[in-house]
Amino acid sequence: MLTGIVFSYIFYPSYLRINKKITNKNFSSLITAAAVILIITLPLFFVLNTISKEAYTTYLLSRQVATSGQFFECQPADKAVCAIPNYLADKVDDPKIKYYFDETIRGATTKITRSISNILFSIPRFMLDLFVMLFVMFFLFRDGKIFVDKIECMLPLEEKHREHVFRKLNDMTYAVIYGSIIIAVIQGTLGGIGFLIFGLPSPLLWGIVMVFAALIPFIGSSVIWFPAALMLIFNGYLNSEITLIIKGVILTLYGIFIVGTIDNILKPKIIGSKGGLHPVLVLLGVIGGLKFLGVIGLVIGPILLAMLVTFIEIYEEEKSDKNEA
């Protein structure tokens, strides 16, 4: 329901444009809500499908190489590079280590199978969530302005304070939502540039995927660039190319210090400057909202804190007016 409310706010201007061409409010609301559902689900399925295919391919390749022992075979000109792989190659011949190695692979296979099963079992609940979102968005597109006007009239505040509260609510919601989108686009662009610089395939495609992955809390775009960096390092060992190893290490550092820090540095500043809230409070709102409300708390948390600050300001103003009187 909260997600439906947030997306109703985001796409309400789109509903107004559609309603100008289709004067029937019910029909225009249904079209807008259905379009929002498609906008959400199609990229999501695309990202998940791409990530799952790449992860499964990487897993199969790693298992094949590891079980054959090729991963630990290294004979380049630079012996220092091969010191660790050759040492591991000698240890792998130990029956005990082989047993633990096989158990690790078997455990990883079980976890992957279990994860796929959990995703399949969660599809009915996901479809129910989409239906609830569609239901909420339909009525908010159609009657949202009426609801907002009634809530505004019910607030036990003076007219100037009511306007201030709703203006702050609008500014903070705008800042949080569009600030998150701007940061995601920046991270995806930087990630795609990194893929291009280090010679990875399809930098444009993976840059777009990282835009959507950047919206995922905590994990973010690292779900894309970190496996890519590991693959460069692995391929460097397997093909005895020190250049690939260096590229993988630099890509890891690039992802951590360039792509990864953008979210922590720019997001509080963008949201704080647009919404009139201190960056520390923005960060607190994001963390607290995520803790208590889940993913949607990334949006709701800072908004609630902004409302709290606004009501404190109103209280201080009223108290000051009474003291002067």
Image: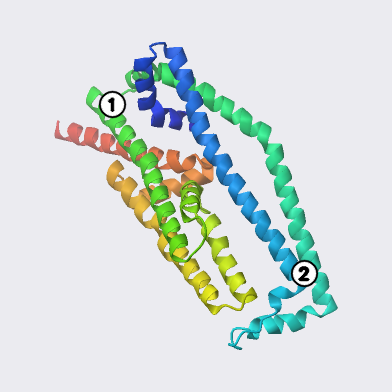
Q: Which residue is mark 2?
A: 67
* Label 1: few (<14), some (14–19) or many (≥20) C-alpha neighbours in 10 Å: some
Quadrant assignment for the C terminus: top left
Q: Which residue is mark 1?
A: 162
The kind of residue on which mark 1 rests is Arg
Q: In the rendering, at what x and y percent does residue 135 appear? A: 53, 21
- Outermost residue on the top side: it is 24
Q: In the rendering, at what x and y percent does residue 161 appear? A: 25, 28
Mark 1 against mark 2, which lies toward the viewer? 2
By what rule are the colours in the image chosen?
rainbow
Q: What secondary structure is marked by label 2?
A: helix
Q: What secondary structure is marked by label 1?
A: helix
* Label 2: few (<14), some (14–19) or many (≥20) C-alpha neighbours in 10 Å: some
Q: Earlier in the sequence, mark 1 or mark 2?
A: 2
The kind of residue on which mark 2 rests is Thr
* CA distance for labels 1 and 2: 68 Å
Q: Nearer the viewer, residue 271 or 225?
A: 225
Q: Nearer the viewer, residue 75 or 147?
A: 75
Q: Nearer the viewer, residue 172 or 112?
A: 112
Q: In the rendering, at what x and y percent does residue 158 appear? A: 25, 23
Q: In the rendering, at what x and y percent does residue 292 appear? A: 52, 42
Q: Is residue 23 above or below residue 312?
A: above
